[in-house]
Image (tube, coloured by chain):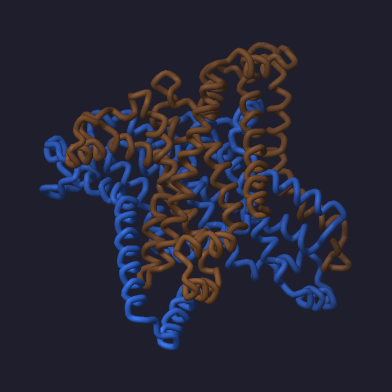
Amino acid sequence: MSSLLPNRSKTSVLVFLVPPLLLYGVAVLLPIFQSLFLSFFRWDGITDPIFIGLENYVRMFVRDDVFWISFFNTLSYLVICLVLQLGGALIVASLLISLRRARELVKTLYLLPAVISTVAIAFLFQRIYSLDPVGLLNQFLQWMGLGQLQQAWLSNVDTVLAAVSIPEGWRFTGLYMLIIYAALLAVPQELEEAARLDGATWWQVFTKIRFPYIRPVWISTTIIAATYALRGFDIPYLLTNGGPGQASELLTTYMYKTAFTHTDYGYASAISMFIVVECLIAVGLIVLLLRRKADA
Amino acid sequence: MTALIATAEESSTPRRPAPAHRRRRLNVHRTLASVIIALIVVVQVYPLAWLFLTSVRTERDFAAGNPFALPSEVTFENYARAFETGNLWLNILNSLIVTLGANALIVLLGMMAAFALQVLGFRFSGFVRGLFLVGIIVPVQIALVPLFIDYSSIGLLDTHLSMVIPLAAFALPMSIYLFSSFYEYIPRETYEAASIDGAGPYRIFGQITFPLSTNTIVTIVLVNSIFIWNDFIFANTFVLSDGLKTIPLGLQNYIGAMGNIDWTATFAAVCITITPLLLVFLVLNKAMIYGLESGATKG
């Protein structure tokens, strides 16, 4: 690109560019290569690392059941987060558009959970799911006459994965609502009005006018939400640490345990390389799927 | 923006009077939408209100059962006990240090990189831009093991800096992106005039680009502060000693130690840790909402 300052020196470019590149290189880029490198070794951090080639990857894909359990748990976690965050965001944003007053108030209130730390959220949900003393959820079930459903949601292997996913969905739905709301505001009102006068139903207006209009924003929002869900860690780690058994183990919590509880740095690096690749594949798939629909 | 559209809606109504039944249906829709929104907002906010309500209950009241009931009497002793038992003041101080340090790096280095990329320009700027973009997608977990090893070999483990470095580095790409897209709008003539007056790149950066960036700086600091203040994973991995623990870790310690012994004081401790950011958010919510919107849609 051309410079706006014709007589700037090469040194000045370096002065401005090197410090940010250095920080970024040391803390983001270098670790990617270090992880790749370490993933070919067996290393406990104390004795000398032993080069084992692709052995960590073979172990991961072929012999490690926990890896696969964690992988499928991560996918479920991803689906629950996306449905809550994007589905909830789209519904609330669409409703908010039709509201006349209090839009700013709703935006602010809906966004509140995004400001709370994950440690506080984990504590809050522990109390919500609690059976003894009876938490909000179980108390609510009793009032609804569904007392037989009362249980310790975080100890039941069938419910724990959903129970650790919901707080993450709850936390960020406000953020995605803001983005989609801003996109919906840009949809031309005359177009929708004209379609309605022609007798188009609410659903037709939505699928033929609104959604195509916000599709680019929808794609980038889905990418952000998906990559954030795939790296989700704090809440499952704090609520159950993957348990009971491996019922709520995600790839991230499994990687963390492998690295810092079992100090198996090589294998942990292989898992974290997989998490990176998984994020890249997710981004590719989202772009591909949402674009193809546009062509059809 | 919202106000503009709201007035546009109202002014268009009298021009094109809808038939009575249509208007009634529209009103029913509006009311229904309001009711559903109100319900959703209650579900969204009630858990937070419940935290605060429980934090002012007496222990006897809490043990009595019904979690939905309003407190029978209001007490602030829970807060006194939370401050006594925990290290909360120290945790808040540590969080302030880390948040300020990381924000300073994010803003300064972000401006510098954007200035080099957007204003100075150089041959491989496209490649460098691409390098920085990688950081938006890459999950932070990739850096944990390598940084842990690097830190322990150079003695940086268990310092404030060990948290500041990765927090700043992973936020840098978005910061560079926002500054760059703002610098695009600074007119070329501004720079030409300064160049003719004999100003070099350093003076132009200090006297033109930096002062013009104030709004973008506010946006970036507000948005990043939320994530840095609440960071758990880097703090949990790189910090071991109690004296350095930030709020999330201090709170986790407190919950671990007192969570099953002194329930109501634990609720108070949780409320103490979330209040500073909640207050900032409620006061500055317009700026923060704007920042979150622009940060996310431009990314």
- Which tint was used for chain B? blue
Chain letter corresponding to the colour brown: A
Image location of residue A191, percent across then percent down? 55, 73
The residue closer to the viewer here, A182 or B57, is A182
Image location of residue B212, percent across then percent down? 65, 70
Q: In this view, does B292 lie above or below B240?
A: below
- Residue drawn where x is 72% and y is 67% of the image: B184
B127 relative position to B8: left or right: right
Image location of residue A30, percent across then percent down? 72, 35
Q: In this view, does B110 lie above or below A183?
A: above
The residue closer to the viewer here, A24 or A210, is A210
Q: In which quarter of the image is the N terminus of chain A?
A: bottom right
- Residue drawn where x is 33% and y is 71% of the image: B25
Q: Which residue lies furthest to the front in this view?
A: A199
Image quadrant of residue B59?
A: top left
Q: Is residue A281 above or below residue A16?
A: above
Q: Residue furthest bottom?
A: B15
Q: Can residue B151 be seen in this view?
A: no
Q: In this view, does B52 lie above or below A130?
A: below
The residue closer to the viewer here, B298 or A65, is A65
The residue closer to the viewer here, A294 or B56, is A294
- Residue drawn where x is 40% and y is 62% of the image: A95
Image quadrant of residue B165?
A: top right
- Residue drawn where x is 41% and y is 82% of the image: B10
Q: Is residue B200 visible?
A: yes
Image quadrant of residue A187?
A: bottom right
